[in-house]
Amino acid sequence: MYDVDAIKNAVINALKSAEANNPSNNEIKVGVSQRHIHLSREHLDILFGKGYELTVKKVLMGREYASEECVTLVGPSLKSIEKVRVLGPVRAKTQVEISKTDTFILKVSPPVRPSGNVEGSERLVIVGPKGSVYLNEGVIIANRHIHLNPEYANAHGIKDNDYVDVMIEGIKPTKFYDVQVRVRDDFNTEMHIDTDDANSAGIKNGSIVKIIKK
């Protein structure tokens, strides 16, 4: 027997996703980012062994992927968060992205930053199966941001590194201000927020939000 409700929901979600990627409207879908880490080649070698290569678990946008590998984060309080997903490929600098809620466990105070801006940010210890790394800087809370492909951006007069407001409708109507926009031809049209923001606004992966130009 077919699950009629499941089929109906799948069709509705597919239509919403297609509509959210349509450059003729100002609606986009949401991607909720769990805590994760990007590793440099040097730190990958220390944590997993010299010459180790990450195993692709799921392909993401922008040439990135979620790997099978995970690490443990340890803060100054010696409390830890286990099974933090490593995203590939390797980067020039290691970057840890956590939520505000995570900081209460780790007892750290990272700044809210765009990805890649890690200078002078928070520190902690990363533990892998083959070793550990004291990360002197690199821990941030990622800012709210939107990925756009050039077609969508051009249709709405939006440029790379613009800032827009975003309206969330639903059971907990919310407006996010000053959301950074990044435009690249290998991006899907999607807003990325962390779990704290998603929970506060009552939204989840695949939810639809509306861009409001400033």
Image (cartoon, rainbow, N blue to C red):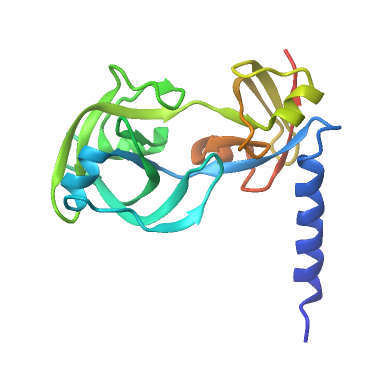
Compared with 104, 80 (above or below) is below
**Residue toward you, 196 or 162:** 162
Report whether 121 appears left or right of 175.
Answer: left
Q: Residue furthest right?
A: 24
Residue 81, visible in the rendered structure: no
Residue appearing at x 32%, y 30% in the figure: 92
Report whether 3 appears left or right of 176.
Answer: right
Residue appearing at x 39%, y 54% in the figure: 67
Q: Residue furthest left?
A: 131
Q: Residue furthest bottom?
A: 1
Could you say where residue 175 lies in the image, as x and y percent from the top left? 68, 25
Residue 115, visible in the rendered structure: yes
**Residue toward you, 162 or 193:** 162
Which of the image's four quarters has the N terminus? bottom right
Residue appearing at x 73%, y 37% in the figure: 28
Q: Residue furthest front?
A: 51
Could you say where residue 97 lies in the image, as x and y percent from the top left? 39, 35
Compared with 105, 47 (above or below) is below
Could you say where residue 18 lies in the image, as x and y percent from the top left? 79, 47
Residue 55: which quarter of the image? bottom left
Which of the image's four quarters has the C terminus? top right
Could you say where residue 139 lies in the image, as x and y percent from the top left? 31, 30
